């Protein structure tokens, strides 16, 4: 009897081992199907095989497999939801440094990171899908938390990118009564077109980002933009909503408009600069000849009309190196290019050297002022002093062309009504004005002395928006044109607000 029991137990264990312990189990007396939850006739092996072919058994197996698959998927989901701090930090570092995430597919780069971090390096898709949004949201939350109930200034400008899109950026800075406040790239948006209506909508949208559902209208004290007519009109409309806001057009832009007037008054100098720029562009032989004939002197500058003050800087260069440049031009073959022929005719014109000397003597102050106005964390009185210095120098200009430039300066600043209010505020803060505030009719109606104290470090330029556009253009390089704008916007905001690029 003992031998028969031992033989049955051995047989059952063999069946379990043969057909799988995940399908069958035994207690040494019966064979039990886990799938169907029934006892199986095990007298013949054939009976077991037949049971496994039945519809009931196969459906039970399929149901069990489906349950196991769902459990596995849930486990993988739970594991993926537990975000890696290393992956997050790596993603933020790469985006902030403007390193494309696809560099992670570079084998040498991956091996380097793995070797010196001892971590499993994620793929690009993992960071893009799992971490970019988190980092962007964290960046936005920190920004909103810092701004909260503070008084702020807002600056908006737009540009046309290489894809032909109208891109507008919104910079927000905190106004503090005793020190410079932090500034942030709050928002970037693609506009259908650039006009006062789209700018007003963008302004409102940006304020809604800071204060969702409850915009603090009285906390917006200053709006900075360029002097484009649609920006001026937008400022006029917005002041009806943000009743304490002063609209100031950028003083650096204003000085650049004066520089453009100077360029228009000196046609011969402009012709020389334009042709010299063409002569050495993509001409390695001529560049080599220049270095040989004029050792120690930089190549002629290539001013860009939209780059503030660059034309006057070029004129100053030719003033300082006129005789050397004339010698170099004389060594060039006028048959090589039309620009050389024109430069040869231009450089011997009477009065050219005198014009260059006049520009350097009287207008170099303009380029220096533009550079000074781009300095961060300067007090309001310090910035206004830079502008005032330019005005005082230009009031001393002589000659017809000098008077025309002075007239342009006066027109530019006469239209900047908001700047006149800031000048009065600066005098109050510096103790230079004893008049009562009620005498200042240009102030917003509900202004108080407490509002005025927040202007001690108020900016008078919109150069910070220009810096954000520089970062934008760097991200949107020739080999990254497939960037969807929404993703590009997130990269830009993360980069500018984590790297201090504005």
Image (tube, rainbow, N blue to C red):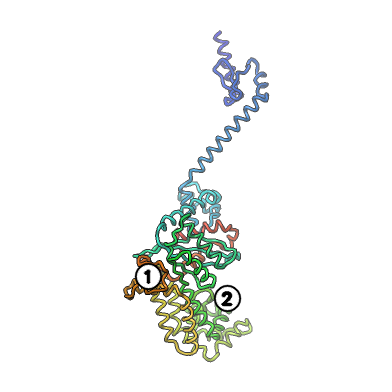
**Nearest to the observer: residue 184 or residue 266:** 184
Task: Please identify the quarter of the rendering in which residue 51 is found.
Answer: top right
Which residue in the protein does label 2 denote?
A: 281
Relative height, residue 92 to residue 245 (above, below)? above
Identity of the residue furthest to the top in this view: 1
Give x and y (percent) for residue 17: 58, 23
Q: Is residue 234 visible?
A: yes
**Nearest to the observer: residue 83 or residue 331:** 83
Q: Is residue 473 visible?
A: no
Which residue in the protein does label 1 denote?
A: 379
In which quadrant will I find the N terminus?
top right
What is the secondary structure assignment of the residue under circle 1?
loop
What is the secondary structure assignment of the residue under circle 2?
loop
Relative height, residue 389 to residue 34 (above, below)? below
Give x and y (percent) for residue 117: 45, 49
Give whichever of discs 1 and 2 has the lower sequence position: 2
**Nearest to the observer: residue 209 or residue 296:** 209
Side of 460 where 275 appears, left or right: right
Callout in the foreground (1, 2): 1
- Give the class, few, some or many, for how many residues have Cα within 10 Å of label 1's Cα (few <14, many ≥20): some
Give x and y (percent) for residue 47: 66, 18
Identity of the residue furthest to the bottom in this view: 350
Relative height, residue 135 to residue 366 (above, below)? above
Side of 389 where 34 appears, left or right: right
Give x and y (percent) for residue 279: 58, 79
- Give the class, few, some or many, for how many residues have Cα within 10 Å of label 2's Cα (few <14, many ≥20): few
Circle 1/circle 2 CB separation < 8 Å: no
Query: How far apart in space, not on screen, are marks 1 and 2 (Cα)?
Result: 41 Å
């Amino acid at each position: 009897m003992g031998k028969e029991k031992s033989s049955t137990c051995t047989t059952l264990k063999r069946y379990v081992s043969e057909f799988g312990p995940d399908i069958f189990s035994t207690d040494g007396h019966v064979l039990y199907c886990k799938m169907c939850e029934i006892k199986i006739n095990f007298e013949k092996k054939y009976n077991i095989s037949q049971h496994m072919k039945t519809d009931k058994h196969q459906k039970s197996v399929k149901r069990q497999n489906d349950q196991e698959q769902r459990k596995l998927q849930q486990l993988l989901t739970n594991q993926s939801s537990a975000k890696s701090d290393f992956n997050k930090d790596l993603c933020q570092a790469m985006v902030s440094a403007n390193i494309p995430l696809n560099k992670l597919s570079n084998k040498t780069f991956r091996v380097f990171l793995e070797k010196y971090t001892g971590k499993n390096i994620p793929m690009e898709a993992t960071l893009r899908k799992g971490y970019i949004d988190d980092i962007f949201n964290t960046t936005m939350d920190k920004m909103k938390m810092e701004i909260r109930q503070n008084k702020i200034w807002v600056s908006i400008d737009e540009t046309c990118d290489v894809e032909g899109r109208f891109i507008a950026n919104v910079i927000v800075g905190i106004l503090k009564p005793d020190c410079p406040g932090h500034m942030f790239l709050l928002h970037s948006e693609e506009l259908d077109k650039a006009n006062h209506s789209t700018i007003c909508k963008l302004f409102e949208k940006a304020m809604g980002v800071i204060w969702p559902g409850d915009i603090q209208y009285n906390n917006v004290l200053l709006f900075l933009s360029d002097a484009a007519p649609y920006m001026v009109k937008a400022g006029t409309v917005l002041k009806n909503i943000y009743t304490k806001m002063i609209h100031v057009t950028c003083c650096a832009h204003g000085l650049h408009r004066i520089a453009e007037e100077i360029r228009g008054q000196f046609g011969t100098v402009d012709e020389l600069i334009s042709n010299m720029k063409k002569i050495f562009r993509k001409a390695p032989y001529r560049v080599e000849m220049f270095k040989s004939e004029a050792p120690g002197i930089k190549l002629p500058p290539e001013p860009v009309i939209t780059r503030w003050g660059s034309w006057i800087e070029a004129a100053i260069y030719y003033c300082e190196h006129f005789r050397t440049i004339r010698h170099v031009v004389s060594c060039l073959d006028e048959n090589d290019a039309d620009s050389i022929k024109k430069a040869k005719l231009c450089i011997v014109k009477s009065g050219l050297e005198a014009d260059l000397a006049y520009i350097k003597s009287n207008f170099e102050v303009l380029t220096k002022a533009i550079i000074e106005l781009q300095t961060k964390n300067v007090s309001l009185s310090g910035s206004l002093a830079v502008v005032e210095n330019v005005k005082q120098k230009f009031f001393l200009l002589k000659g017809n062309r000098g008077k025309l430039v002075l007239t342009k300066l006066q027109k530019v600043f006469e239209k900047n009504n908001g700047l006149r209010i800031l000048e009065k505020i600066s005098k109050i803060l510096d103790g230079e004005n004893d008049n009562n505030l009620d005498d200042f009719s240009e102030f917003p109606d509900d202004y108080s002395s407490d509002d005025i104290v927040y202007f001690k470090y108020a900016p008078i330029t919109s150069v910070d928006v220009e810096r954000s556009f520089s970062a934008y253009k760097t991200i949107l390089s020739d080999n990254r044109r497939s960037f969807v704008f929404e993703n590009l916007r997130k990269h830009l905001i993360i980069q500018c607000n984590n790297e201090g690029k504005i």
